[in-house]
Image (tube, rainbow, N blue to C red):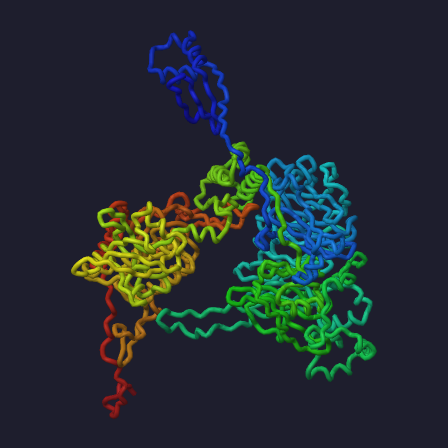
Amino acid sequence: MPLSEYAIDPIRGDVVLRIGADFEILRAQEISAILSSSSASNRVQQSDKEELKVALKTTPTKTHPLHIAVYSDFNLQQERRFPAIIPEDITSLDVFTTSFKQTKVLLGLRGQAWVTPVISDTSPEASKKFAGGTAQNLPLRRYRVIPGATVGGIVRVLAAKYIPSNNIGSNNTALILATDPLSPTAELAFYVVDCGASAAPSFLSADELPKPILGGHLNGGPTIAGGLGSIYAETLEVSPCGRRAAWVDTDGRILAMTIPNITVASSSSEQQPTHVKLVKLKRANNRNQPIVGMCSLNWSPAGRYIAISHSAANQFEIISIADLGDPSKGKIVRGNVVQATPDRFNSKSPVWGRTSFDFKLDALSAAADYAGQREATMLYFLSDRDISLTDVDSPWGTRAPSPYFPEKCSVYAIPLQIPEKGSFGTFIGGGAAELLSELDAEFDAVNESNSKDSETDTPALGSSTQNVTSLESNKTSNDTSSAKNPMDLEINFGSSGKISEFARRAYRVIGIPSGNYRAIICQLNDDPSFILVENQGGDSRVKIFGVDDFPGDMINEIDFDTHKELQSYGTSTNKLFIYLSLGGKLKIVPNTAAGVAELATDTDVLKNIADTDDLALSIMPHLEYEQMYCDAWRMMRDYFYDPELHQVDWLAVYERYKPLVSRCSKREELDNVLELMSSELSALHVFVYGGEYADPLHGSSSLKKINDVSSLGAFLKRSTEHNGYIILSIHEGDPDFDLVDGMYSPLSERTLAISGQKGLKPGDVILGVNGESVLSVPDINYLLRGVAGRSVRLDVLRSGSGDTKERQDAVIVVPISIEAAADLRYSAWEWETREDARRLATEKGFTVGYIHLRDMGASAMDAFTRGFFPDYNKDALIIDVRHNLGGNIDSWLLDVLQRQAWTFWESRATNITTGGEGWDEMFAFRGHLVVLIDEGTSSDGEGFSRGISELKLGKLIGKRTWGGGIWLASDNHLVDGGIATAPEIGTYSNNFGWGMGIEQMGVEPDIEVENNPRTFYDGKDDQLQEAIEVLAQWLKAEPVVLPKRPGPHPNMALKTSAEDCEAKY
């Protein structure tokens, strides 16, 4: 590496050199020898430093490492042992049954894999059974699958999926997606590992690392070079038969593989790798709709088909079904991919299922002995196709209300085969039940069996007499060790390939009401009932819909009222279990009528809970830092919008900064290395933040609260002359929107008058807090710690309150948090700037509206609505996006600002100047627009500014903006929650090409004005003043005038004489 800098020891004469991150020393004796050498002594005399430089460059030198000893225990490099946080630390979850009839949960847990038991009853009474420390009633055991106890952090497990087939040599094996420590850059890889109770952990030590079946050091690396690349771990799905797996990678491809038939005998690196063929699914369906980007996958019961939820070309979500061939024949076939739903509305959450008649036949046949998911005859899904508009029925109103679709959907079903004549339909109850006697002998046999077994049949989930079965009593039915894989029925997609042939068989399951459903979790294995998840006020709720036994067709909602928050949900790979994370507890529910009936009664969430209490994770920081560096580098390579990474030699970047990782002694130092590495791409939307940092408060909210300094919502100045703190100013926000923009200052008249007190004014002096003099402590904040939201007594001297003479007083105030105080100061600046704009415009003889947008999120939409619509009829408008933090609402703002007035209204009493309807388009702004920008205008604030310029909607005034024109999704998180964001979405335009002239360049203003920091702090806003001046000149050149009335109204009087008639004969 080149010499970065050097320093000379003035006493010894030694020279210390910094080369990269290393320090080397050149002894004075060696320097003397160099200078006295013949080559050096013959030189023309120069200054000492210049002579030394020349000599060092031309004479071979030997330096010595400078050893720096820092005496510390380096506690942040010691093993970290901490409890797992549920469900935040969970990255994947699966459930399986062991050969000894115990139900276990396979957890992907903050980069590790664990197996934990399910406790049938966690109530305090039941817990006493395991107390006492005797050898009786031993607690169930949990154990680590990956990694070993001494190498935590060496590998990152992204997903762990149980393989529910018995043809792999072990009943308890798992497919693991993890980073490969044997790969130089820790590439992603797939492993098959033993997750049984008798197995030792995989990745047991640095010398005992398993070999993957795919990826990693075998064939990992960038996809552009044919490697496995990076995978969206949440998309990984193993088929219920355990023979296949599929996933989506960051290139938007769906890939599938046949899970190899191997025996997991050891975690040793001597294990022989198995060749696995990777199959890429077609990237378009039979209707040429693209299947790229993030998709969700759902295997059919036997693994022949995958139902894919993906975006159509018009961005609507649709469902396609891919045929990969019969898995019993071995290899995967790239068969047809058929579109199952139209692209005229959204369809999602496909679930393979059956009709109630199918379940009745199962109950009367040998199929009743099979506990798993049977062959599907239906595909159920959610769709918003029949959702009507909201109660907004017109755009009339003071804020131009826009019609919108509520986020509601309904359950639909597609029959997978064309019903034959005389076969049973899905719904044959009610008025159609009388036709049952006319059907074929098959139903006669079913009816006869019903009469024989009427006393022993299990009632439907929706009936009132349901046997509640605990998890333990379902052990036999949940054991699949002897079960055979089901066969998938051949789906009849129709002969012509037209979407109407198949997709339009769909019908709505009318008994389930429309709702804001997020997903169908499942249809039960032994009952036609459904489990859904509904969004209620931002919270998720489980919804259970019981379906009557055939021939009934009634569907009833079954109450499940729990106060626990639903945090995550899903089904096990083998479809035998449902899992729900409720209030930090993982509840495991058998996917049966009995299991769900038990769920409905367990509102306190005490039964069948995965044992995650005090589950401790062990991490070796030096190993995890290495892993996180590799992860950040790999994800930047595979998530970045440009596969060629702006032509940067990314492997050279990896090698350049990798040596620094071993020097990191704490998490913050790793961030420094990640910043250096990521910055090589020269992309502005690269941020490094988050992660698990050492916390002096140990994560305690109580410690944080009592140590946080509170605020009085004012600027104060310490004055020994006045024996206290002088109030310089009190922050006052917009007085008309106090509940929206935050609150008033605790010292203001508006706040204290409500309680009958007199507010304070600038010039008043705070003498004491709760009886203590403010001068008796180093700072007044010393007395304001931990009192946010609590009453505090202030002793004050009223000097600036307008009284004729000073007087002491006392007030009771409620300080606010530092965060609320910062927001209040910001609101005060917004209000003051708005008032300044209006005042300056009035002086120039025109009217102006002023809107400041702090960011481009939901709060900015509120701010724009509050500011724009009341002032839409002003002569001019200033939109201030200085120090805007970005977001994604530029398209909505530009849409509103592009409205044009083309017609006007007038009634007998009102017109466009007296509060009438005004003009059409509704609330179109007819005046002149200026947008204020500066160096802090970033991201979507820049996109909005560029849109104003490109669409010629107004003028830009201020300074060149930040320069971030590549958008990001912030989904490439590291194992500890930190991130080095990868800009994933490129932008371009016809005029500017890539980056819209924003990336690395910023948006240049039409008129450049720089605010002097000193005078701006004092309240002089040169950019605002220039905006007013520009608008005044603009309005002078192009006045904004209302159209003239057309003249007299039409004369429609009837002509009474032929002479007056204008018609000619």
* For residue 848, side relative to residue 29 (left or right): left
Taking the spot 69% from the left edge, 57% from the top edge, the residue there is: 118
In the depicted view, which residue is nearer to us: 142 or 1021?
142
Q: Say above or below: 715 vs 218.
A: below
Q: Quadrant of the C terminus?
A: bottom left
Q: Quadrant of residue 339?
A: bottom right
**How far across and how far down the image is residue 424, in percent?**
74, 75
Q: Give the camera-side residue of 578 and 904.
A: 578
Which residue is pictured at 61% across the width and 46% down the height? 617
447 to the left or right of 672: right
Front-lying residue, 273 or 631:
631
Residue 464 at what x, y percent from top left?
Answer: 69, 77
Residue 891 in percent (x, y) is at: 41, 58
Residue in the picture at 29% in, 67% down: 756
Q: Position of residue 1000 (x, y in %)?
A: 40, 43
Where 96 falls versus 593 (above or below)?
A: above
Q: Can residue 640 be seen at all in this image of the molecule?
A: no
Q: Nearer the viewer, residue 692 or 975?
A: 692
